[in-house]
Image: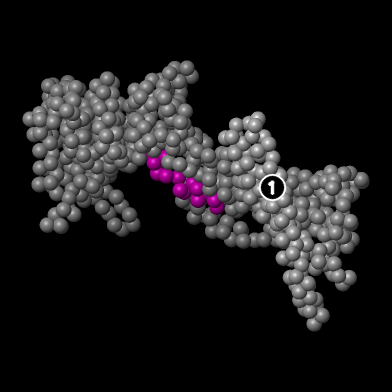
Amino acid sequence: MSLSKTSSSAAFLKIDHVGKTFTRGAATTEVLRDINLVIAKGEYISIIGHSGCGKSTLLNLIAGLTQVTGGAILLENREVSEPGPDRAVVFQNHSLLPWLTVYDNVRLAVDKVFGGAKTRAERNEWTLHNLDLVQMVHAKDKRPAEISGGMKQRVGIARALAMEPKVLLLDEPFGALDALTRAHLQDSAMQIHARLGNTVIMITHDVDEAVLLSDKIVMMTNGPSATIGEVLDVELPRPRRRLELVNDPTYLHCREAVLKFLYERHRAPALQAAE
Amino acid sequence: MTAYSSPARIVETAAGPLPAAVAAISSAAVHSASPAKAAAPATASSSSMRGESAFVRSLKHWASVAVPPFLVLLAALVVWELASSGPKASLPSPSRIWADAKDLIVDPFFVNGPQDIGLGLRVLTSLQRVAIGFGLSAVAGILLGALIGQSVWAMRGLDPIFQVLRTVPPLAWLPISLAAFRDANPSAIFVIFITAIWPIIINTATGIRNIPQDYRNVAAVLRLNQVEFFWRVMIPSAAPYIFTGLRIGIGLSWLAIVAAEMLTGGVGIGFFIWDAWNSSRLSDIIVALAYIGVVGFLLDRLVAAVGHFVTRGTQAS
């Protein structure tokens, strides 16, 4: 099933021999080497790896916030060289502007992206529609300081969705939240993905989260000079329900595969040193 | 030797009456507070207990804010009165000042002729100069601060020069500005401008350098242009720093205007002091000092209040 989808709209987003080297003075550090990945339209991809393996760097490269030093990233056959609303980012720490209300944070993005295309009334409606997607209309006049961490992250997601991005980039979106809130937001993310069918790339270091949400899990080796170690297809039918998956053999197999990759073949350097 | 002995005598005489005076004042305060307490039960029948206790609480709050400085002021006036009551005293006592300069204290806005006007009007003239000079320096300071906060090369080029220029005392600029403008009023305004601008530049630049990378990333993803970034992210994010700079700047402006006006003349409060000194009206000078202090305090509080209002959303994350 996932094979046919991949072949029909192959290379929606293509990461082609991408490398990234940071230079500071005379010292150079190769963070990423020879990353190759082809992502089809509508796929939900997770990138998992130990801390410091360059996951966030890869996401920033796709977002255009930093520039590749080798290879190229192609979105619909056009090279990515700068940030833009077609690759909306949900940042780990939400990054809402604290002096704007929830509504104004989303509205800022809507005005910027659809300023010419939609009328004022349409933009207002679109802003509220996206807040409704994440169930945050009730808090639209609050400032970020007045709402909880999970709510802030919802607003961050609404802001990203409101840009109608071709690719939604999530940088450990649920990492800073408590377990219950995280589960709740994961369910929301699955619902939104099912409804809108957007292409999503999510960074995580939570194995269960990766298996639950993703069509493919991209596992990264340890840095420096990190690269993709393995790509796992998660062949679980959607919609997925976390309770039903607890004893599902495919789920358990995928989970085991990721855990084995992370803790057997590519243990964190700190863990290796400890033994 | 007599010059040294006379202050000693003053302390001696003051040390005795002072505790008595303080005791008298504090007992007066207790008496004045008790009617308020007595009044509270009287109103209890008409208003709810909750509203009334809030009223009493706010009364207590204001009393705790207002009473201590009032007592200290009163004590200082008593000491001053005693210290300068002797026949050889070089400075006028509070009672002398009241007798000499009652018109200045009671009515700030009288007009008896071109140079015989109330201190309130003089202060307004000075404030007008400060408003223009400080307003210009706020605009220019925020723009220059944004430039050196945003651009590494602008900072490398301009910051060392600013660091040197900001140590030049305000009055040192006056001869040059008089030469350049050939008129007293624009020169005074220029001195205000050049005095106030440095803390505004430096604080704005610090604020802008401290804009979190997250906000810059958001702006980059949204593709905000330079103007949008300036108004939507830079100014609100740096606002707490900017207002710190503005607050220091308004304080320095008010320091500089008095000195500048002493030299440039006109109808400002600074020239009034100089004029009073030349005609030996010491009482008038002391009244003017009180005006300057109160106005400076109000200016500081005004900028702080505006800053508090404008930055109410920016501190939290």
Query: Who is closer to the viewer here, A216 or A31?
Result: A216
Judge from the rendering whether residue A132 lies leftward or rightward of residue B275; answer left or right: left
Chain holding disc 1: B
Q: Residue furthest bottom?
A: B1
Q: On the rendered structure, is B233 left or right of B265?
A: left
Q: Is residue B284 visible?
A: yes
Residue B223 in picture, x, y percent from top left:
42, 33
Residue A235 versus residue B15 in the image, above or below: above
Q: What amino acid does circle 1 point to?
A: Ser
Q: In the figure, is residue A64 to the left or right of B212?
A: left
Q: How is the image coloured?
A: one colour
Please check the rendered image and state whether residue B209 is part of the magenta-colored stretch, yes or no: yes
The region drawn magenta spans B202-221
Residue B253: x %, y % from top left: 68, 52
Residue at 36% of width from left, 27% of height from top? A158
Q: Return the x and y of residue A273 as percentages of the image width and height.
A: 15, 57
Mark 1 falls on what kind of element? helix
Which image quadrant for residue B277? bottom right
Tell me which residue sits at (68%, 36%) in the image: B42
Question: Is-magenta flag for residue A73?
Answer: no
Residue most extreme to the right: B113
Task: Give the position of the N terminus of chain B as an image quadrant.
Answer: bottom right
Q: Is residue B103 left or right of residue A266?
A: right
Indicate the quadrant containing the C terminus of chain B: top left, top right, bottom left or bottom right.
top left
A49 and A186: which is toward the camera = A186
Q: Which residue is mark 1?
A: B34
Q: Relative to residue B9, is residue B23 depicted above or below?
A: above
Q: Which one is nearer the viewer's eye here, B135 or A179?
A: A179
Q: Residue at x 79, y 75 (%)?
A: B9
The quadrant where residue A175 appears: top left
Residue B55: x percent and y percent?
A: 63, 38
